[in-house]
Amino acid sequence: MQADHKLYEHIRMKEGNNDPIRTREEIVSLFYNHIKAVNEIYEGTNFNGIKGLHFVIQRTSIYTPESCDRGRAKTDSDNPFCEENVDVSNFLNLNSQRNHSAFCLAYALTFRDFVGGTLGLAWVASPQFNTAGGICQVHQRYNEGSRGWVYRSLNTGIVTLVNYGNRVPARVSQLTLAHEIGHNFGSPHDFPAECQPGLPDGNFIMFASATSGDKPNNGKFSPCSIKNISSVLAVVLKSMPVDPTRNANPVGYGKRNCFQERTSAFCGNQIYEPGEECDCGFSQADCDQMGDKCCVPHEARGTGGPGPCKRKPGAQCSPSQGYCCNPENCSLHNKNEEKICRQESECSNLQTCDGRSAQCPVSPPKHDGIPCQDSTKVCSAGQCNGSVCAMFGLEDCFLTEGKPDELCFLACIKDGKCTSSVHLPEFAANRTNFLQNMRKGKPGLILHPGSPCNNYKGYCDIFRKCRSVDANGPLARLKNLLFDKKTIETLTQWAQDNWWAVGVGGIGFLVIMALFVKCCAVHTPSTNPNKPPALNIYQTLTRPGTLIRQHRQRHRAAAGSTPSGAVAGQSRSAGAPTSRTTPSARPSAPPLVAPQVPVAVPPPIGVAGPPIPLIAAIPPPGASSSSPAVIVLEPPPPYTAADPGSAMGGPKRGHRKNKRQAASDATPGNGKKKGK
């Protein structure tokens, strides 16, 4: 079990009283309570004949902010979680980069608020022998495409204790850990509908969204999950047993059996368990970090003395046994000292040491019915899990119709109908109890962010809107919708009954595609000089108006123009006589003649009459000339749209084309799956 520096910071400010030793003790206690809750679930479940699964914490790692420097681990630290802004997948990847072959599972707890309200993530096991991931998986190489071959430990998972800025209740985070371990054991999310019963008994552990934890089914595995987990356990237990403490190296790509016979306690995990006098850690460095000089560490085995996980001579107690042991003199805190060992909570009072035990006594609970969790729950036996509706003799229910923001209001069954608290007189705007932050004078109670809604089909986000649970992602949901067997059968039957519509639709599709290709053709550039230039979007939008204007202009020119013979006669009278075979002028290519620049003009082909001078000069302004100016009409110069350089009289320009570099998108290696 690991705790990153984010969780350390939160515990230090809340429960640790800014005391490093107290903070570590609180985190270790957090580990112990979570694994204890997980054991109650797995030990009481019969996985098709496989019983008595029990988890023992072998090692704990607690990382502090001092081990990080600007998002990187310091040279003397092995903290893998120093990166600040990482999403849930990358955080799991950071945990998987380390070698965890010595353990069946390796989990990291954090206090990072992941996007989408994600509380945990883990690798999913498969019953296929050669498929990696899940329980007992060793640290080995995998191909991750562009990253190449990398080493990963896929027997990992992560859990966060914060959701939309709020601390997750202890019961919910414990069920989240059991849920993620269920993924490691090969169970996907509960499916189909018979494994998602909803109210009144609630959904099972492997439901895609977090449950409230107060319903009978919330702490049980569904029949679907039991079947999936049993198939994986059957393959693992048939594999060769391997002692992970003596074989921490990769043992191949198949399954391995890392299960061991259960023992009463595991010395060195910093958790005080039955059969131990104390447990300060595996090494003396672990004991020093815990501020425990009263206990012998695990590595002292065989060195003589009292033995590992035993109190040193003269020590009455050890801080590893509880907060009420004084680490300075290894004795119990006296009752008169009023040493605080547990802070006050919404539903329990502050507690002090009683001078009789190193463990902190049970905190006295506050009165039942006190509003807690922003008035969406009430206190019950010292825990914030009571029903608000029950305080008024009503039953809880979920709103299933309405807008997303309406579905996140607390609802109760009244007169046989599920009614929003907005419309219940018990929660009117002028009420004096069950008041909520930022909602003074408003009717109804709005659920806490992260609370289930719409009969567990969604959860309330930070904006208090019900967001649908997307267990497998949008692509998987679309795939299931399109390629579902029932959907395919429905489409096939419809096509058989409406064959004529299919034919008409096919022809219409071909016509539309032909028109689409025709329309796109005018936008495609071409190097053919005989084709018009490509149009842009603006020209396409204005093309109808342009065609109308051009048609009108041609019509006016044809109606008011002079016959072509008269124009030709006038041109010939100004210059030399020409024959009828003289080529006409092409207005698209005017003569490239600058003022005061002599131009060489070849004689027109087939022209009769006196010779035309080879040099014609245009006189400057104001100069007199006895002869009329010679108007020269010549064919267009040999340039094309693809080579505009020749139009300027310069050399032909070459066109460079950038070579498109092909980028191969790498895909992650097969055989690895993640579950939320």
Image (spheres, helix red, strand yellow):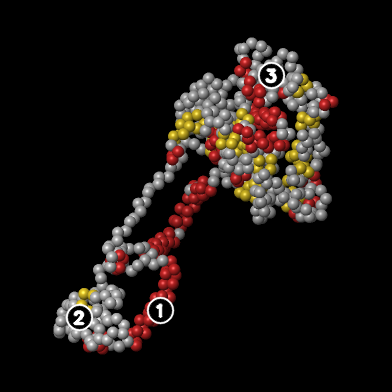
Residue 606's label in the rendered image is: none
Q: Could you tell me which residue is drawn at 71 percent across and 37 percent down? A: 13
Q: Which residue is mark 2?
A: 582
Residue 292 seen in the current view: yes
Q: On the rendered structure, is 571 left or right of 17?
A: left
Three-letter amino acid code at the position of disc 1: Arg
x, y (%) of residue 585?
Answer: 26, 79
Type of amino acid at the residue the image marks with label 3: Cys
What is the quadrant of residue 536 in the picture?
A: bottom left
- Looking at the image, tell me whether mark 3 or mark 2 is earlier in sequence order: 3
- Upstream in sequence: badge 1 or badge 3: 3
In the rendered view, tell whether residue 610 sits above or below residue 344.
below
Q: What amino acid type is highlighted by mark number 2?
A: Thr
Relative to the observer, which residue lies in front, 299 or 138?
A: 299
Give me the C-alpha separation between circle 1 and circle 3: 99 Å
Q: Which residue is mark 3?
A: 295
Image quadrant assignment for residue 343: top right
Q: Which mark is residue 549?
A: 1
Label 2: element kind? loop
In the image, 579: left or right of 234? left
Which numbered disc flags the more N-terminal residue, 2 or 1?
Answer: 1
**In the image as oriented, which residue stretches furthest toward the top?**
304
